[in-house]
Structure formats: structure tokens, C-alpha cells
Image (cartoon, helix red, strand yellow):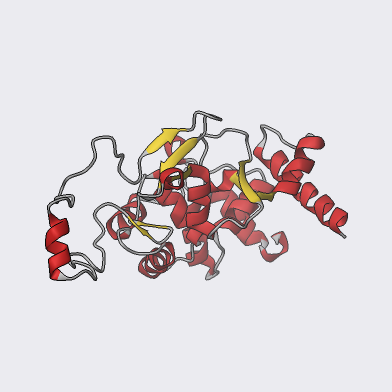
Amino acid sequence: MSKFYTEEMKKYIADNCKGKTILDLQTEFNNKFNTDITYKAMKSYLSGHKLKVGRRNEKHRKYKDEHIEFVKNNVKGITLKELTNRFNKEFNMNVSESAIANIKNKNNLQSGIVGGQFQKGQVSWNKGKKGSMSPEQYKKCQATMFKKGNIPANRRPIGSERIDKRDGSILIKVQDGHKQQNWMGKHRYIYEQAYGKIPKGHKVIFADGNNRNFDLSNLILVSNAEELIMNKRKLFSENAEHTKTGALIAKVLSKAKTR
């Protein structure tokens, strides 16, 4: 990829990276050289040439206040895909759905849509309808129905979090009325919001071993067989990149064993 950059381009990056965010440098570079370098490509170039960017308080900040504010103002009631499309159209960018999911997670934002279930405040299509029972049946049942606003004292709202007593992981409430199925691991929820439902026989692990680090880049999807190989061969590490490499090794070994 470095062959793409001319000497003039390389000199420009080296001379102008100090005191800027990667996003600012990427934008200025594309404007000057009429190119379409992505954020990821610019970050990779800087890393490969050991060039540091950013002010101390913005070192890892990719998105500006206006980007965050846009997501906050548009997140309610739409899917992650639609939100991503609106974001890219508004700022003429090409960010992925996982990037927008990251913004939502870091700012504790929820769309009101979780796995096809309604969240608190979202209006159902059949609100106000009495169902399929006859008027006489409805009248008989009305006395024992829950009144508007009558919520059990111990019910926790959707979106609440708690600690799983079994392993200390964080659980998030995603629905009501299904007992233990009301809760799921927060890391699984975040992964599914970005990439879709987790396949059967797979799980999401933390690359750096910290089950409080919910950044998408720290979440890895592995099969049960691959996790077993990683445990046997001690391929887990507190270094996220080492664990990711271990997961790739386990995937190759698992496929070879299957064959």
C-alpha cells in the first residue's frame, strides 16, 4: 500500500501529522491530493511509519462532536443499517455499521429496537386494540387487567444492566416476559447489534481478557471448538492482538481437524 504514496505525499503526512486527529489529517490529505484514502488506510500508514498524531486529549478520537450529536439525534426508532446510511449521507463519509454501533455503545445510546422486540417508549402496532375477544369477554376480564402505568415493583426496565453471579460478566435486559431469556451478555448484545445474530455453536470472547471492555474491536467471534483449541494451546493473552492471532490459528487448526 505504501507504494501508492508519492514522495510528496509522504513528506506531507510527516510534516502535518503533529497536533491533528487522524480524521483531520485524512480529510486534509484527500483535499490536497484529490484522493480517497480511508481512515483505516491513513491509520495503517501512520502506524507502519511510526508517526504519532493527535493532541493529548484527542489522540484516539476519530469522530467529532457534530458526528456524536448527529447519532444522538437520529438513533431512536431506526435500525443500525438505516442510521449508518443517514450518517454517511450527512457527512459524505463511508463508515461501517460496526463503527456506528461503537458510537452508540460508548455514548450509551439505544434505538428502541432489540432483536425485534419493543423497548420502553416504543409504540406497538396494536396499541389500544382489545384483541380478538368479544365485547362481553373483554368486559368480564377488564376488572382483573393491569391498569395503565401499573408496573410490578420489582420489574427492571429494558436496557438495565446487572452482574451475572455465575461469572461476574455484565448482563443487559433486552425484553420482558421471557424469564431468563430477558437477559443476555452485554458483549453478545453489542456484537449482534453490529454484525447480526451469533451463529449456533459460537460465542464472543474478549480479546484482552477484560470482560468490561466492550469496544467492538475487543470482541472476537469463535466457535466452541476454536475456543477449546485456544485453551489447550494457551493462545489467550492480555495482549488483544496476540489473542486475535491465536483465534486465527485456532480457526485453521479446527478446519484442518474437520477435514
Picture coordinates of residue 169 (x, y %)?
52, 34
Picture coordinates of residue 139 (x, y %)?
11, 62
Q: Residue at x 47, y 56 (%)?
A: 193
> Is residue 46 found left or right of 54 in the rendered image?
right
Q: Residue at x 24, y 62 (%)?
A: 123
Q: Residue at x 50, y 28 (%)?
A: 165
Query: Can the viewer see residue 18?
Result: no
Q: Residue at x 40, y 50 (%)?
A: 104
The quarter of the picture where the N terminus appears is bottom right
Instruction: Tell me which corner region of the image, top left, top right, bottom left or bottom right, holds residue 118.
Output: bottom left
57 is higher (above) or lower (below) than 30: above
Picture coordinates of residue 140 (x, y %)?
14, 59
Query: In the image shown, does 202 or 37 lie closer to the viewer?
Result: 202
211 is higher (above) or lower (below) than 46: above
The quarter of the picture where the C terminus appears is bottom right
Query: Can the viewer see residue 157?
Result: yes
Query: In the image shown, does 251 or 126 lie closer to the viewer?
Result: 126
> Is residue 84 found left or right of 147 in the rendered image?
right
> Is residue 174 found left or right of 215 in the rendered image?
left
31 is higher (above) or lower (below) than 211: below
Query: How many tags in the picture?
Result: 0
57 is higher (above) or lower (below) than 128: above
Picture coordinates of residue 27 (x, y %)?
47, 60
Instruction: Tell me which corner region of the image, top left, top right, bottom left or bottom right, holds residue 232.
Output: top right
Query: In the image shown, does 71 or 20 lie closer to the viewer?
Result: 71
